[in-house]
Amino acid sequence: MKKKFATRAISLTVTSALAVSLAACGSSKEGSEGNGSGSKSPVTLTLLSHYAGAQDEKLKPYVDMWNKDHPDIQVKLEPVDFGELLKTIQAKQTAGQVADIMHVYSLWGGQLTKNKVLAEPPADVTDDIKKNYPDASIKGASIAGKVYGFPTEVNAYALFYNKKMLKDAGFDNPPKTWDEMYNMAKAITKKDASGKITQQGFGFARGYASIVDQPFMSLMATAGGQLISDDLKKAQLDSDAGKKTMDYAAKFYKDGIADVSFSVSKTFPAEQTAMTIQAGWYAGSLQGTMKDAYKNIGAAPLPSPDGSKKGSVAYTWMWGVNNKSKHQKEAWEFLKWFNTVSVKDGLTPEGSFLLDAFNSLSTRKSDLDAKPIKDKLADDAVLKTFVDALNYAIPEPNPAAGTEIQDILFKQIEATWTGQATTDAAVQAAQKDIQAKLAAE
């Protein structure tokens, strides 16, 4: 999440809603009469997303392409910061000024479908998605077994590491087991005379719920566990896998190998942290930040307790249509074009946009078969690691209370890192509160 979850995050706290005037939301009205000739004005669709700033500039050429070729259906971009997106969607629903097309984080899907915000796609869209995307993408864009939109950013987690820093410490390869990662991190970490860390062997990113929870859940997956049962009815943090993961993650901070004040988001690209867990989008961010030093960056599957199991969590974003839009047919027509039609070197607009804006890949089969992506995968071992991870990653659960559950887990994990709670107490507290949220649905 570019965030994003930060992409970008992947990135990712909802704060306040934008005030949007009726005049700025042409999609909430039917087309009006034109210049007296009896013809109606073009349908105007608003497209609400967190693609702001430079990302908005990358998206705009494809929307301009559509608008030029479809004078009767015009699309207007409405970008907001990621932290404002969910509240903006909610505020617009309440005010009756709905955006026709929305870019939605799958974690919000349960809440948005429960509140009847997302429209179910027409049959041809559902069929296309089921035929042309991998299982992880389809599940990520589904709520209660129903597809609700085109998968866009589908990101799994893996281990980013600095090859030079590992080599300087005497390690030729990234770790494959939890013990190896702990011991390597301990050997790489350096402190000054006062005991303050100056170089960190391993650290978790911090700052908001998804950037903490998703790496944690990915490690939990390598131990054979998942936070919530497949039917979204039972919290499973108090499982053996959950307890082991909470203990393991906290151990780096408890033993002084990592420090919560040593910002991984700054120190990893500065080559002061050797290893971290992040989503695939992070590679594009590092390339832009590190420049030539990016050659030192590698990626590998996450270590597992005994090195025998691969595990990860995949989160998904999707393009959906508002259930209250008066122009659902036109909105789906645009989304079908944006996600299925080849416009550049065999890539769809979505595939080309993701590659341009984030150095990230669309998971649509035709995009993955396009020459630019095949060439990219052949030359980019980091990117290939994350594409491969989609074959074994489990989708992030998306119950109706998903955002609240994410915050519960986030607070308890960080409490163990800062020494405010024991791992046992954190597991029990989070387990109880998450189960209560699931039971209330």
Image (spheres, helix red, strand yellow):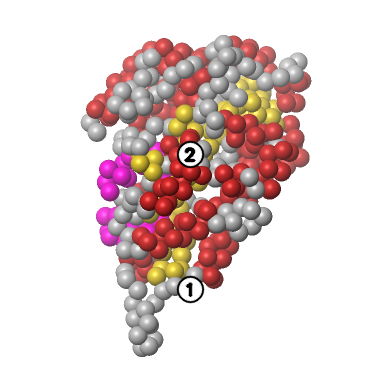
| Amino acid on which the number 1 mark rests in the picture | Pro
Instruction: Locate the C terminus by quadrant.
Output: top left
Locate residue 205, reporting x and y percent. 54, 30
Q: Quadrant of residue 414?
A: top left
Would residue 353 appear left or right of 148 to someone viewing this image? right
Give the residue at x 38% y 46%: 148
Is 149 rendered above or below residue 311? below
- Give the numbered dot on residue 385: none
Q: Amino acid at mark 2?
A: Ser
Can residue 80 be seen at all in this image of the molecule?
no
- Specify which label sits upstream in the sequence, 2 or 1: 1
Q: Is residue 171 above or below residue 353?
A: above
Q: Nearer the viewer, residue 316 or 194?
A: 316
Residue depicted at x 63% and y 42% = 284
Q: Are marks 2 and 1 in contact (CB under 8 Å)?
A: no
What secondary structure is marked by label 2? helix
Q: Which residue is mark 1?
A: 71
Residue bearing the label numbered 2:
137
Residue at 51 percent of width and 19 percent of height:
222
Crowding near the residue tagged with mark 1, few <14, some 14–19, many ≥20 C-alpha atoms within 10 Å: few
Residue 169 x, y percent position in the rendering: 74, 17
Q: Residue drawn at (69%, 29%), measured in percent from left and top?
A: 298
Give the distance between the C-alpha atoms of the residues marked 2 and 1, in whole angstroms.
32 Å
- Is residue 97 in the magenta section? yes
Percent x, y of residue 280: 58, 36
The magenta stretch spans which residues? 88-116
- Assign a secondary structure to mark 1: loop
Query: Is residue 71 visible to the viewer in this orientation of the structure?
Result: yes
Q: Is residue 118 above or below residue 268?
A: below
